[in-house]
Amino acid sequence: MPRLVRRRELLAGAGAALIVSALPGCGAGLRGTTQSASPGMLVFPKLRASVDRITRITVCTRPFRAQGPRLETEQIGRKTIVHNYGHGGSGWSLSWGSSGIAVQKAMATGERDIAVIGCGALGLTSAILLQRAGAQVTIYAKELPPNVRSSLATGLWTPDSRICFEQHATPAFKQTWQSMARNSFQTYQTLLGLPGNPVEFIDTYTVSDSADTERHHGTATDQRPKFAELQRELVNELIPKSEEYGPGRHPFDQRYLRRNTLMMFNLTAYSRMLLSDFAAAGGKIEIAEFHTPADFAALRQKTLINATGYGSRVLFDDQSITPVRGQLARVIPQPEVNYGLFYKGVSFVPRRDGLVFQAVGEDDYYGFNDATADPDPAEAALAVNTIAGLFNSG
């Protein structure tokens, strides 16, 4: 039987630290602007990047679908299921816009007592938007943050990260994606400056040993399908202009830097805020596990939003979902470190809830079709040591 989660228990759980190493399957101005010692010269607070400072290693399985997210309605017995999953590496980034579409479909059924299955990025935003639309909402989930896959995401605004293959980015898909991206972006602007800094902007620097600072996406002979890249085409004005820094303008020897400005999500504070908002509006959470859609028959609600992410591969036997493995090495926070780095296929993100080091490879096929969930200490060490090398040279 589902177990009702009381509000006090809900909020206490949201604030607890996640100690496990991996899951099965898995004020707010611009924080990243570095100070200049002289005009045009960048100074970076030194990053204490070392393997002994790793606090945990987590693995997340992202749900990629070649054709993009599943946002459609399905009738199963007497239940109307609205699907909201399959966003690849764009779940948090597109959550408000995607959930807005799902909520419109759910409310169109006429029901006002609605269930949400799953308590990750898409589940929480679906639930809150349902409440704002006037519905009574219950979330049914096996796990709550921080023990959900969404809590193990990198935490950056990446709205087209593995969103679909290029061949499926039709005009209709692009229109839907653009709407999701813009709606989500605007919602995130309302969350800047809140206690705990759930959302903030940072400067992040791509570092290269040559003047070519672009991340390459395969070669001309690569026959694998290309991932769609939609930001520059459809929401270019939301992307701040980048700036180049050559040798002599930074402390990283003879390397070349490109600075970009990105939104960052401090997921511990952000998830806690969402859970608090949901509970304050009268939302209920029940602990439950579903093995097949037939299990939904026991629920009183006739309309459900399915936001189970990678879990839909088993729950709905959706074999169109391809797992994409992503591992994070979490390191003791440094409040003074206010910038991100990308170097030699490794990403560093200065999250306030723990510095994040992640091997992301040279293209988006890194971790593709890999469902392994066991932490890889060697990969974690490589990620930390690669970034540490920038500060140890010269």
Image: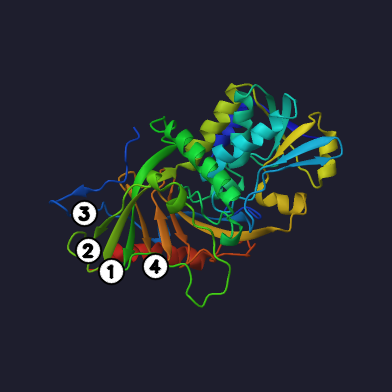
Q: Quadrant of residue 124?
A: top right
Mark sitting earlier along the chain (4/2): 2
Q: Which residue is mark 3?
A: 42
Q: Which residue is mark 4?
A: 344
Relative image position of residue 167 (x, y in whole percent): 59, 61
Q: Which residue is mark 1?
A: 211
Residue type, label 1: Ala
**In this rendering, position of residue 238 left or right of residue 391:** right
How many marks are shown on the rendered structure?
A: 4
Mark sitting earlier along the chain (4/3): 3
Given residues 279 and 18, the one toward you in this image is 279
Mark pair 3, 1: CA separation: 17 Å
Residue 215 visible, this angle: yes
Q: Is residue 111 above or below residue 252?
A: above
Outermost residue, front side: 171
Mark pair 4, 1: CA separation: 14 Å
Residue type, label 2: Gly
Q: Which residue is mark 2?
A: 246
Q: Residue at x 51, y 31 (%)?
A: 273
Relative image position of residue 307 (x, y in whole percent): 67, 42
Relative image position of residue 184 (x, y in whole percent): 50, 38
Labelled pair 4, 1 in contact (Cβ < 8 Å): no
Mark pair 4, 3: CA separation: 21 Å
Q: Which tag is nearer the camera, tag 4 or tag 1?
A: 1
Mark sitting earlier along the chain (4/1): 1
Mark pair 2, 3: CA separation: 11 Å
Numbered disc 4: secondary structure: loop
Q: Which tag is nearer the camera, tag 3 or tag 1?
A: 1
